[in-house]
Amino acid sequence: MDEREFFERLRANPRPVVVDVWASWCRPCRAIEPLMRRLQEEYASRVDVWKLDADAQTDIVRRLGVRGIPTLIAFNAGQEVTRRTGAGPQGVLQSLFEAALSGNPPSAAGLAPADRLIRMAAAVGLLILGGLSGPSWLLIALAGVVAFTAVYDRCPLWQAISPRLKHLLSSLKAR
């Protein structure tokens, strides 16, 4: 299918669509494949899933503005609602399907902008204080930790490892 046909079909599709941009060599793509199959079955009569091979459909991928894979893009009535790049747990992927159904992006569960700004300001203050006092590596390290708490909810690496860390910690508590 060419670029024109893809976008015409997307606009004319009677159901919401989740476009899964993947490649055969992509390990995260293969990691989310079972979750995507499960979600595709769960939403079978309500949301269509279109798989788009990033290597074979480069024109469409470029026009969609995809910069990394896997990328999942939710559409409702031919309009993009939200997207996610990178692998994620089932709840995050399911939120894409729900967004496609509702036509509204998933609610941001992250920090409020004011909270983010306060944490970043505190980190900068600690960094300056750490640099002026010797340098104090403890204060500089603390500045790094505080800065991370301001952005962790947007970090794809953190999103990928946090479910595994939670599982590991819960299994350690069970012992």
Image (tube, rainbow, N blue to C red):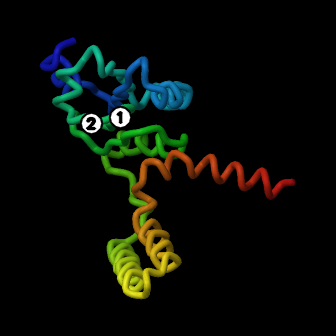
Instruction: Kindly check if marks 1 and 2 are in contact, taking CB atoms under 8 A apart as contact.
Output: yes
Identify which amino acid the numbered label 2 is placed on.
Answer: Arg
Determine the image quadrant of residue 47. Answer: top left
Residue at x-position 47% and y-position 40%:
93
Where residue 57 appears, as percent x and y from the top left, is 24, 17
At horizontal 35% and vertical 78% (from top left) the residue drawn is: 124
Residue behind mark 2: 67
Q: CA distance from mark 1 to mark 2?
A: 8 Å
| Horizontal relation, residue 162 to residue 168: left or right | left
State which quarter of the image contains the N terminus: top left
Secondary structure beneath dot 2 equals loop
Residue 13 in the figure: left or right of residue 29: left
Q: Quick one: label 1, few (<14), some, or many (20+) residues within 10 Å?
A: many
> Residue 121, percent across and down?
34, 80
The answer to whether 147 is drawn above or below residue 22 in the figure is below
**Quadrant into which the C terminus falls:** bottom right
**Residue at horizontal 36%, vertical 35%?**
72
Who is closer to the viewer here, 95 or 55? 55
Q: Position of residue 143 (x, y in %)?
A: 44, 75
Q: Which mark is on residue 71?
A: 1
Indicate the position of residue 100 as horizontal and vertical percent values.
Answer: 35, 40
Q: Point out the frontmost of discs 1 and 2.
A: 2
Helix, strand or loop at mark 1? strand
Q: Is residue 36 left or right of residue 121?
A: right
Residue type at tag 1? Thr
Q: Front-most of 123 and 71?
A: 123
Q: Pick the residue in front: 174 or 132.
A: 132
Question: Considering only vertical position in the picture, is 132 above or below 74?
Answer: below
Q: How many tags in the picture?
A: 2
Q: Quadrant of residue 134?
A: bottom left
